[in-house]
């Protein structure tokens, strides 16, 4: 199970890559493996404001439907346009080509509250 | 409750399977290549499913034929020893489908009846017989190249005709093959004693068959438009509602539930099972509501132009989805649904649930044989 050291995580199995005031979001290797083959991804429109912990979108596999939650509050500024036709990228490259969206993070949000790779690894092993 | 396991459980673990509970059994859901790859391997090549969770109820001795003929809906008189037949067991009072099953007619007064895992007890209550499920493995080899793979194990088994059965020997063990399946493809189902099953599985894999789990089995049967008990068949659902009138032999004087079913035939079923083709990738899902559209929901031809994904446009409710998923062959969401009987083929419906409003067209399965119009 791949858990890159440079990323932050949530206990709902999202990953966050922080770059200045922006956060790129996806689902973890653990999550994609548990979901199985992803066949559809529902994402918000760019411009949508999201609250921390609110539903950001949905990921549907051949066996289930799972919600994706916003790890941080902010405004969605970009969504991965390739996922509409190639949702399998969440399975094949969850930390790369399978990214979901980018959020312009609201002021006052504290990245330090997100899980480190070490903490997330403990979570997936418990 | 302890879950039953296939005698091949360790082999599935070795192959990297993830497991799922189904009908009291812990069976492979998928292998590392994943459900979609397994699905397409069945459509284009050969796969092998372990379906040991299916029950086998053996009926032997004088009166076996007469008992089955007087109980199940289909007419064994249409086939002969060595044949296989799909049939239903109905509830006497309302003609609900208690189980759907394949009957293997092995010898003059010798039958193996194969109910769904969780219905073996209710089938035995109706027809008696001996439960011989334990101690044997059933391997379903399916796909256009299934017989080629099976020939590596037994050329005799690989030659069995559609809806025919053949007894054959493997390393001195008595086995049965039947030209049946649940995928919409050609294939053979083999019942083999547990002690030779591991070798049979290994030989099938070496011959190019891909191991496939219940995930692919479900998407394959759905794409083929085949019913699953507990979804399209079950309490309150008759064969006529499910569009399976061909399973009912009215020429027979008796079968369980005949009177109740005859009453429904006279008045007309209140709902009919139909196929739904979504206009995008999003899977339709069991439990979603189907409504007529209150107004035009897209400009021009089917699939052309953007469509609103809200339920604001939903009109009169006409039914409910019983099974839904993604069709790997079509690249679209598909489903089976019970709809008002006057719903015409080609009707455009709005399927709603879980916050989604999905446009879908009433079509006639099998889905994987549909010719889709070119999309803009």
Image (cartoon, coloured by chain):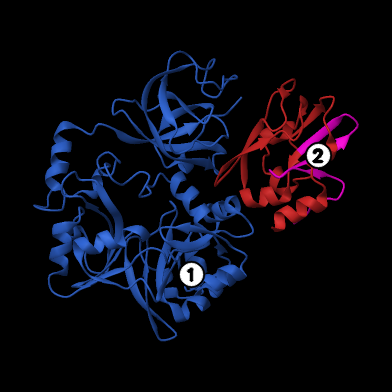
Chain colours: A red, B blue
For disc 1, the marked residue is B150
In the rendered structure, the residue with mark 2 lies on which chain?
A
Q: Nearer the viewer, residue A108 or B201?
A: A108
- Split into 4 quadrants, where in the image is the N terminus of chain B? bottom left
In the rendered structure, the residue with mark 1 lies on which chain?
B
Residue B207 seen in the figure: no
The residue located at (37%, 60%) in the rendering is B117
- Mark nearest the camera among 1 and 2 is 2
**Residue A80 position (above or below residue B200):** above
- The label shown at residue B368 is none
Q: How far across and down, in percent of the image, does residue A5 sit?
A: 86, 50
Residue A85 horizontal side relative to residue B200, left or right:
right
Q: What span is colored magenta in the figure?
A: A1-25
Q: Nearer the viewer, residue B102 or A59?
A: A59
Are the residues under marks 1 and 2 on the same chain? no
Residue B275 horizontal side relative to residue B32, left or right:
left
Residue A52 horizontal side relative to residue B205, left or right:
right
The residue located at (53%, 37%) in the rendering is B283
- Split into 4 quadrants, where in the image is the C terminus of chain B? top right
For disc 2, the marked residue is A113
* Residue B341 painted magenta: no
Q: How far across and down, in percent of the image, does residue B110 sit?
A: 22, 73
The residue most toward the left is: B253
The residue located at (57%, 19%) in the rendering is B308
The residue located at (62%, 48%) in the rendering is A35
Please say if the residues under marks 1 and 2 sit with CB atoms less than 8 Å apart. Answer: no
The residue most toward the top is: B295
Q: Secondary structure at mark 1?
A: helix
Q: Secondary structure at mark 2?
A: helix
């Amino acid at each position: 199970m791949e858990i890159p050291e440079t990323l932050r995580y949530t206990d709902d199995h999202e990953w966050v890559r922080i770059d200045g005031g922006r956060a790129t979001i996806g689902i973890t290797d653990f999550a994609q493996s548990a979901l199985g083959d992803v066949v559809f991804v529902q994402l918000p429109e760019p411009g949508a404001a999201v609250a921390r912990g609110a539903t950001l979108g949905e990921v549907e596999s051949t066996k289930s439907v799972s919600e994706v939650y916003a790890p941080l509050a902010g405004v969605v500024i970009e969504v991965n346009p390739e996922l509409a036709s190639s949702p399998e990228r969440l399975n094949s490259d969850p930390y790369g080509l399978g990214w979901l969206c980018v959020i312009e993070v609201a002021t006052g949000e504290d990245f330090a509250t997100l899980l480190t790779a070490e903490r997330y690894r403990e979570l997936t092993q418990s | 409750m302890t879950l039953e396991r296939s005698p091949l459980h360790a082999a599935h673990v070795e192959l990297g399977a993830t497991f799922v509970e189904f009908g009291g059994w812990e069976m492979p859901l998928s292998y590392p290549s994943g459900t979609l790859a397994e699905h397409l391997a069945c459509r284009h090549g050969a796969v092998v499913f372990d379906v040991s969770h299916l029950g086998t109820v053996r009926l032997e001795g004088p009166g076996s034929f007469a008992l089955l003929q007087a109980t199940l809906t289909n007419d064994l008189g249409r086939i002969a020893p060595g044949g296989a037949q799909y049939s239903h067991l109905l509830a006497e009072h309302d003609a609900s489908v208690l189980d759907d099953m394949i009957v293997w007619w092995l010898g003059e007064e010798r039958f193996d009846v194969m109910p769904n895992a969780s219905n073996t007890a209710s089938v035995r209550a109706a027809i008696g017989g001996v439960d011989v499920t334990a101690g044997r493995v059933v391997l379903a080899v399916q796909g256009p190249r299934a017989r080629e793979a099976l020939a590596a194990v037994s050329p005799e088994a690989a030659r069995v005709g559609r809806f025919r059965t053949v007894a054959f020997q493997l390393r001195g063990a008595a086995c049965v093959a039947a030209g049946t399946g649940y995928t919409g493809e050609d294939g053979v189902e083999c019942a083999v004693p547990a002690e030779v099953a591991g070798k049979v599985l290994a030989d099938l894999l070496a011959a190019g068959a891909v191991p496939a789990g219940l995930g692919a089995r479900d998407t394959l049967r759905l794409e083929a438009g085949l019913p699953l008990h507990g979804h399209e068949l079950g309490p309150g659902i008759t064969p006529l509602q499910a569009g399976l009138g061909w399973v009912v032999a009215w020429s027979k004087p008796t079968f369980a539930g005949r009177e109740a079913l005859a009453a429904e035939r006279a008045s007309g079923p209140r709902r009919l099972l139909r196929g739904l083709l979504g206009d995008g990738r999003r899977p339709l899902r069991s439990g979603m509501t189907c409504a007529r559209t209150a107004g035009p929901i897209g400009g021009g031809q089917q699939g052309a132009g953007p469509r609103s994904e809200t339920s604001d446009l939903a009109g009169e409710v006409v039914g409910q989805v019983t099974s839904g998923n993604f069709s790997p062959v079509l690249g679209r969401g598909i489903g089976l649904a019970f709809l008002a009987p006057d719903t015409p083929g080609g009707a455009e419906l709005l399927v709603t649930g879980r916050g989604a409003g999905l446009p879908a067209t009433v079509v006639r399965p099998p889905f994987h044989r549909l010719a889709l119009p070119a999309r803009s």
